[in-house]
Structure formats: structure tokens, C-alpha cells
Image (cartoon, coloured by chain):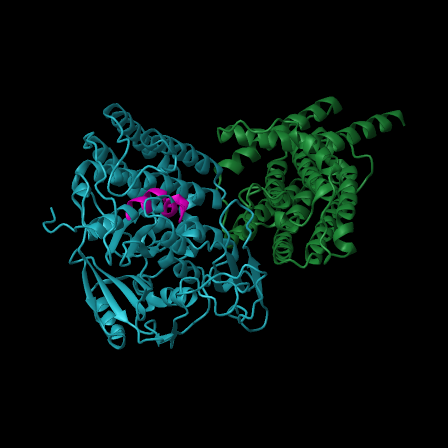
Chain colours: A green, B cyan
């Protein structure tokens, strides 16, 4: 019982602190790479506090969907963070891969409906683009997680945070699945080469276009959610890599996850600065790679298992 | 070497052509390879006249055609059906003077918005803006409607997310595909032309610099040429070299800025910051030379106060050399970047035939295979200090426009260096105290966006009676709307940046 409480406490702390810290590291790295001084690493925390204190401007055209959506999607993402073993420890609540994909979809649906509710052209654009992309991303996520599940012989997500039967060297199952989720994460967390997170051009936005109407505390929530999603997905990728390296002890896994996540955030910053945003029509090509990786991972896992 | 230099200081061959023959006359002019530089109206003692500026790139000459309108006439037969480049000029004349072109294919207001009172024409005689709250009875502006299943409209602007000028873009889309784009300008109509007839001619130079503030050197030089041609005087070789150097430095800074913008619009942060750093270095050279990063308040007609001394000129030239070296390292970041090339290639194509019909100017024209550059078409001795090529690409896409800019950057750095080394520090005192009566002057400059024309006319007392500025963007806005047809909505910002147009220069 006490071990469970310790685990819960660590995961809660990470849920509260890690997402905004990672965004801070990402932005600071990006600034350095562009030879700018850039904000402090802790700036996202100050921004969050500032936004929560501000009053919100809400369009009279919007209804309860717009107002309620940030809370609804936050709930979905918090559950996601509690059922996924992204911190290196077993998740406090047990869940399986279908629940994982469902929760992501639920959060996306809430923000999409809210964007439609604003009645603005940009909101509608963003919602339609995001749902179009999610159709391409979901199979990748399901298959990548399934590859892990087949390999570990267990559908629950928690099985992912322990290398199965002490075997290392998964014959490319884990690296392929990790690569597939990395590509899917570029879409889910709206990073380059899918979307330029720093752009002000509404016409090129996907996820950002849905958030345009938010201000004040709701904007703080929406921004925190993007960060939380990034943290969970990068943490999940870390588990695949740690499994490949056959690391078992909890302390090694937690610190390993932390290190890998920061490395991935730095890699994301490098991609933000040096990659060119892909043309909308070229995005399916990129996502096909993710699907191919996860499919092959599934096949290899089935052959080995 | 070209033997017959273009003489910016007139007198320009002016010619009377009856209004009924104007359309046929312009048609033959354009068939002969000449350009419609400018079409505008002016008040005469007995009503109005149409003023046409014809530029002959092959003959290296400029001509003015006057066409008197009958007394009290408020309409004339539209020129646009035969001369498509006249379509915006005629809309502007209708807005400013109330002279309606009969038979114009798409007549609607260009700069005067619905909130102005009906029958209010800013430049027409006796027009005064009502000071009380304006009650509009104007026919509301109607955007072109695209009908069909699933067609929807995306309105963007006039207030944009970036700190840029105001303009409204109305996209009619089918899914992500742009079926039609209509651009509505006029949000920064400030009455520049009217103001130029009211302020003293000595202070006019400050007003023209603000006509489009990113082209302050270009506007200042075009203004200087126009005023000097009005008076029939020329300035010394050194002053003209200094002016040309300023225009070239402005071109370097703005082209680098545009390439930075293209990088930003394809999400290529590294390129955008690298070009941004270089642009700041060029603005530093401008400050060293003129005391202002945007070269405002420095260049003047007839004289030049504070000609930079030899040490400053040497320092500026050596800094330019350094910029040139840096450019050679930085340009490949964008121009040899496979991802960026894929993004730009085949994007926003402006066909050469259409570009010719709409009379495009500047880098946009040269990217569509039109070999028109005022520096070559109306050559002056200072631009022959070195041999330099004119940058031409035929594809007409975003990549071609970027390549033209990259190519012109190298040329302009060489030109500016050569121009700066040939400046002798000689005082150029002003010899003009009043302007001649009933005279016309024209100044034409290849500003960084392209052909920039200033036309000035004085009345019988020697006051400026009419001042017309034709910003290069005026010719190119239509091209932007045409080039994005059939492209995706998310491609628009990139196409827009590749044309890099001025709102304030068009709205005036």
C-alpha cells in the first residue's frame, strides 16, 4: 500500500511540474539554436500563473461547449496520464491500449467541438484538419502499442514498463514501435515538420487554430494540456527504449525516462528550428512511415512471441 | 555601354491624344513592347484630363499622353477591356475623381470604403470631408461570390496576427482548395496625394518617404528625380551615385528581409534568424551612411546636405563587402535546402503571359520571364559603373521569386560597393527657390519592389497642383490573387510573402 502511495505521489508531482518544465527547456533550446537569448526555463510556469490571474474574453457567439471543453479535455488527459506508465513507474490505474487511444480521441473531440462552437473560420479549419490527421495517426498509435502488448504478452499498458521476462534485445520490435510513436507524437503535440508551433499565420495552423479564441485561465489550461500530452507521449516512447535496453530497477527507469524525455525535447527543438514544415498534401506520406514502422513491429512481435 | 542615356531631367515628350483614340493608341503602344507606367487623372481649367505615362524599355524613353475629357464629363469609355493593366488605375480614378469608366469588367471601389459619404471624391475640385459623423449612402462593397455545394468563405484581416499592415483577404474555398481570392485594400488611405498638394514643396520629401515607409529611400529618390525634371536641373554625379547607393542598400535589406520571411512562413526558424541577423547588419550600414536605419530625412531634391565623408564611405563599403561574404554563406541555407525547395517549387505560379498582361513589375515580373528592370530600361550613367546582369527566371513560382531576390542581392552588393567608392565629397548647394509654373515632372526608380513612379504637376503660380505616386505593389496585387487560385489555403502565406506587397503604398 505504501509503495502504491509513493508511486502515486511521484506521478502526481511529475504531472504537475514536468510538462511546463519540458516546454521551458524546449523553448530555451530553440532560442539558443536561433542565437536568441530566449526566455528562462521556468518562464512557462510564470506564464501559466499570469494567465490564471487574467480575466477571459469570451465571444458572445459561443456556447457551453466552448466554455466547458478545456475542463473536459483536461479530465481526459489527466486520466490518460494516470493510466499510462510514462514516468517509468507502473501507472496508478491500470488501463489498456484501447483506453489510451480512446482518451486521446476524447480530448481531441472536446477541443474540436469547442473550435466549431466558436463559429470562426479558423476554428472550423483547425478542427477539420486535426480530425483528418487523427484518422492517419490513430492506427499508428494502436499498432505500435499493440506491438508492445504482443511482445510482452499482455494488453495492459503497465506491462510496458517492465521488460518482459527479463529479455532485452527485442529484435527491433521496441525501436520500431518507439519510432512510430515518435512520428505520431509530432502530430499529436503539433511539432515540426507537421505544424510550426511558433507561427502566427492562422491559415497554416492545425492544432493552434483551435485555441485561437481562448484567453485567460482557459488558455492556461489548454496550453498545459498540450504540454501534458507531450510529456506522456515522450515518456511512453522512453519506456520502449528502456525495455530494449532491459533496464529493470525502478530508480533506473525513472531517471532513465527523465533523461530520455529531455533528450527527446531537445531533439524536438532541433527539428523545430532546422526542419521545413511539410506541405499539407505531403503529411500523409510522412505518417505512412509511422504506420509502416508499427506494422512491421507488430509482425516481428508476433513472430518472436 | 548604352549610348543614349535616359535623362531623368525632362523635358518629357508630352502629347495630346483625344480621349476617343486613347484606347486604340495604348493598344498599339503595348503591342510595340511599351509599358503603361501610370494612368491617372488631373484637373484642368475646363474639367478633367487623363494622364498616361508610357515607358519604352527598348527606346529608353518616357512619354506623357494627355487626353482631355469633355467639359463636365464624369464618364469615359474604359480602357481595361483592351489594356488589362489599366484595371486598377481606372478603379482608383473612379474613387479619387469620380470619373467612371464605362465598360470596365469589374468596377468596384478600390480605396474608398463604405463609411465615406456617397459622391465624395477626395481629389475632385471642391471636395471636402464632412467633419460631422459620416452617414453613408454608398452602395455596399460586394465581394465576388463563388457558389456551389460545399463552398465556404474564409475572411482574413484587416487586422492580422502579425504586426503588419491592414488588408482584407476573402477566400472562397472548396475544402482546403482556394477557388477564388479577393483582396480588399484601402484601410490605410491617408490622403497622401491630397496632402502633397497642400504642404510646401520643400517639406514634400518627408511626406513621400512615408508613402510606403519600407521604400523610403526609393520614394525619396523618385521624388528628387520628379522635382528635378520639373525644374529641368540635374545634380552632380556624386549625389546621384549616393542616391543609387541608398536605393541599392534598401534593396539588399528588404530582399534579405523577404527571404527571412519566406523561411519563417515555411517554419524554417534557423534560416529566418540567420537572414534576420544579416538584415540588421545592412540597416546598420544605412544608419552609418545616412544617420537613419531606414534612410529617412536624408535624400532631398536639388541638393544634398551632409554628404558622408571619405572615412564613412570606406567603412560602409567594407561593411558591405562583409555582408556580401556572409550572404554567400547564408543564402545556401534556403536556396540549397531540399525541403525548402520542395516547398517553394511550383507554388503560386504566375504565368509569363498573364504577368505581361497585368503589367507586373519588380522581382515578381522578372521571376515570370519579363526582362523589365528600370535600371536597365531607363539607364543612367551611375548604374553603369560595373557590368551587372538582370536576374530572370521563367517559372513564375515562389522558388523563382526567391531565386531572383537571391541573385539580385549579389548584384546589389557589388553595385552599392562600386557606387560608394565613386563618391567625391563636393557640396551640392540648392539653386532652386521656386518651382516653374505649369510644368510636369516624372521620377522613375527601380525600388526594391520594382518600378516606382512619381509624377508632379504645378499650377500657374508654381505650386504643386497634382502629385501622383505609383507604388510597384499597385501592379502586383492582382498577381497574388491570381497565383493562389487552385492552391491550398495553407499555401497562401508563403505565396503572399513571395510577392511581398505594400498596403500603404497602394492605399495612399
Above or below, B119 relative to B241? below
Give the residues drawn in magenta, as a range: B207-222
Q: Who is closer to the viewer here, B495 or A277?
A: B495
A215 vs B269, left or right, is right
Say whether residue B210 is magenta. Answer: yes
Is residue A156 shown to the viewer in this render? no
Residue depicted at x 47% and y 61%? B183
Residue depicted at x 73% and y 29%? A17
Above or below, B96 relative to B390? below
- Give the overall secondary structure of the magenta segment: helix
x, y percent for residue B323: 32, 31
x, y percent for residue A126: 62, 53
User: Which image quarter holds the C terminus of chain A?
Assistant: top right
x, y percent for residue B212: 40, 48
Q: Who is closer to the viewer here, B35 or B269?
A: B35
User: Which image quarter holds the N terminus of chain A?
Assistant: top right
A69 vs B504, left or right, is right
Say whether residue A210 is magenta. Answer: no
Tell which residue pokes out farthest to the front in this image.
B461
Residue depicted at x 21% and y 67%? B29
Q: Who is closer to the viewer here, A230 or B375?
A: B375
Amino acid at each position: 500500500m505504501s509503495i502504491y502511495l509513493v508511486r502515486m505521489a511521484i506521478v502526481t508531482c511529475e504531472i504537475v511540474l514536468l510538462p511546463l518544465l519540458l516546454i521551458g527547456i524546449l523553448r530555451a533550446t530553440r532560442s539558443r539554436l536561433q542565437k536568441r537569448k530566449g526566455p528562462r526555463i521556468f518562464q512557462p510556469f510564470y506564464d501559466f500563473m499570469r494567465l490564471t490571474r487574467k480575466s477571459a474574453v469570451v465571444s458572445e457567439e459561443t456556447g457551453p461547449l466552448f466554455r466547458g471543453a478545456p475542463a473536459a479535455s483536461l479530465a481526459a488527459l489527466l486520466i490518460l496520464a494516470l493510466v499510462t506508465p510514462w514516468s517509468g513507474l507502473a501507472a496508478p490505474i491500470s488501463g489498456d491500449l484501447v483506453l489510451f487511444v480512446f482518451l486521446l480521441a476524447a480530448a481531441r473531440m472536446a477541443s474540436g467541438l469547442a473550435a466549431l462552437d466558436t463559429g470562426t473560420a479558423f476554428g472550423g479549419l483547425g478542427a477539420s484538419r486535426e480530425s483528418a490527421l487523427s484518422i492517419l495517426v490513430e492506427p499508428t498509435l494502436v499498432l505500435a502499442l499493440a506491438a508492445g502488448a504482443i511482445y510482452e504478452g499482455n494488453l495492459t499498458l503497465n506491462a510496458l514498463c517492465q521488460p518482459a521476462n527479463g529479455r532485452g534485445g527485442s529484435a527491433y520490435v521496441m525501436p520500431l514501435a518507439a519510432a512510430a510513436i515518435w512520428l505520431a507524437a509530432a502530430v499529436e503535440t503539433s511539432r515540426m515538420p507537421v505544424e510550426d508551433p511558433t507561427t502566427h499565420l492562422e491559415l497554416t495552423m492545425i492544432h493552434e487554430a483551435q485555441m485561437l479564441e481562448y484567453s485567460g485561465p482557459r488558455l492556461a489550461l489548454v496550453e498545459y494540456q498540450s504540454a501534458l500530452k507531450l510529456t506522456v507521449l515522450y515518456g511512453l516512447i522512453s519506456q520502449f527504449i528502456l525495455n530494449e535496453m532491459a533496464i529493470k530497477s525502478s530508480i533506473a527507469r525513472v531517471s532513465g525516462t527523465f533523461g530520455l524525455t529531455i533528450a527527446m525535447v531537445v531533439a524536438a527543438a532541433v527539428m523545430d528550428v532546422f526542419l521545413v514544415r511539410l506541405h499539407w498534401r505531403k503529411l500523409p506520406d510522412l505518417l505512412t512511415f509511422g504506420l509502416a514502422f508499427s506494422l512491421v513491429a507488430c509482425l516481428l512481435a508476433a513472430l518472436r512471441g | 555601354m548604352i549610348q543614349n542615356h535616359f535623362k531623368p531631367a525632362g523635358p518629357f515628350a508630352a502629347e495630346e491624344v483625344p480621349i476617343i483614340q486613347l484606347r486604340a493608341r495604348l493598344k498599339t503602344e503595348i503591342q510595340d513592347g511599351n509599358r503603361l507606367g501610370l494612368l491617372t487623372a488631373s484637373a484642368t481649367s475646363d474639367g478633367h484630363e487623363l494622364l498616361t505615362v508610357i515607358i519604352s524599355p527598348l527606346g529608353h524613353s518616357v512619354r506623357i499622353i494627355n487626353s482631355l475629357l469633355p467639359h463636365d464629363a464624369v464618364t469615359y469609355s474604359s480602357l481595361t477591356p483592351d489594356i488589362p493593366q489599366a484595371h486598377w488605375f481606372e478603379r482608383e480614378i473612379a474613387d479619387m475623381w469620380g470619373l467612371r469608366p464605362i465598360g470596365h469588367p469589374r468596377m468596384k471601389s478600390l480605396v474608398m470604403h463604405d463609411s465615406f459619404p456617397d459622391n465624395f471624391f477626395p481629389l475632385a475640385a471642391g471636395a471636402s470631408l464632412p467633419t460631422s459623423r459620416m452617414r453613408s449612402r454608398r452602395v455596399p462593397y460586394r465581394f465576388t461570390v463563388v457558389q456551389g455545394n460545399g463552398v465556404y468563405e474564409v475572411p482574413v484581416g484587416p487586422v492580422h496576427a502579425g504586426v503588419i499592415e491592414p488588408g482584407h483577404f476573402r477566400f472562397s474555398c472548396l475544402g482546403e482548395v482556394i477557388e477564388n481570392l479577393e483582396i480588399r485594400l484601402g484601410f490605410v488611405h491617408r490622403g497622401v496625394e491630397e496632402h502633397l498638394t497642400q504642404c510646401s514643396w520643400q517639406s514634400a520629401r518627408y511626406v513621400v518617404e512615408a508613402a510606403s515607409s519600407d521604400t523610403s529611400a526609393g520614394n525619396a529618390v523618385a521624388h528628387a528625380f520628379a522635382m528635378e525634371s520639373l525644374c529641368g536641373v540635374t545634380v552632380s554625379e556624386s549625389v546621384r551615385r549616393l542616391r543609387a547607393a541608398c536605393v541599392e542598400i534598401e534593396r539588399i535589406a528588404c530582399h534579405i528581409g523577404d527571404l527571412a520571411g519566406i523561411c519563417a512562413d515555411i517554419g524554417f526558424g534557423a534560416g529566418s534568424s540567420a537572414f534576420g541577423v544579416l538584415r540588421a547588419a545592412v540597416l546598420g550600414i544605412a544608419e552609418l551612411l545616412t544617420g537613419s536605419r531606414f534612410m529617412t530625412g536624408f535624400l532631398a531634391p536639388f541638393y544634398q546636405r551632409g554628404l558622408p565623408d571619405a572615412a564613412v564611405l570606406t567603412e560602409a563599403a567594407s561593411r558591405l563587402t562583409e555582408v556580401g561574404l556572409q550572404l554567400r554563406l547564408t543564402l545556401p541555407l534556403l536556396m540549397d535546402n531540399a525541403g525548402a525547395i520542395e516547398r517553394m517549387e511550383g507554388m503560386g505560379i504566375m504565368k509569363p503571359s498573364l504577368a505581361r498582361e497585368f503589367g507586373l513589375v519588380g522581382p515578381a515580373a522578372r521571376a515570370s520571364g519579363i526582362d523589365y528592370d528600370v535600371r536597365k530600361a531607363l539607364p543612367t550613367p551611375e548604374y553603369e559603373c560595373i557590368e551587372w546582369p538582370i536576374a530572370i527566371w521563367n517559372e513564375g513560382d515562389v522558388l523563382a521569386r526567391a531565386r531572383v531576390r537571391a541573385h539580385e542581392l549579389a548584384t546589389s552588393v557589388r553595385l552599392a560597393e562600386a557606387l560608394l567608392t565613386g563618391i567625391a565629397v563636393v557640396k551640392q548647394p540648392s539653386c532652386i527657390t521656386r518651382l516653374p509654373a505649369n510644368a510636369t515632372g516624372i521620377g522613375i526608380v527601380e525600388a526594391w519592389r520594382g518600378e516606382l513612379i512619381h509624377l508632379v504637376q504645378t499650377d500657374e503660380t508654381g505650386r504643386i497642383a497634382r502629385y501622383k505616386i505609383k507604388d510597384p505593389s499597385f501592379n502586383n496585387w492582382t498577381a497574388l490573387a491570381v497565383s493562389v487560385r487552385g492552391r491550398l489555403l495553407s499555401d497562401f502565406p508563403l505565396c503572399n510573402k513571395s510577392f511581398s506587397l505594400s498596403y500603404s503604398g497602394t492605399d495612399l
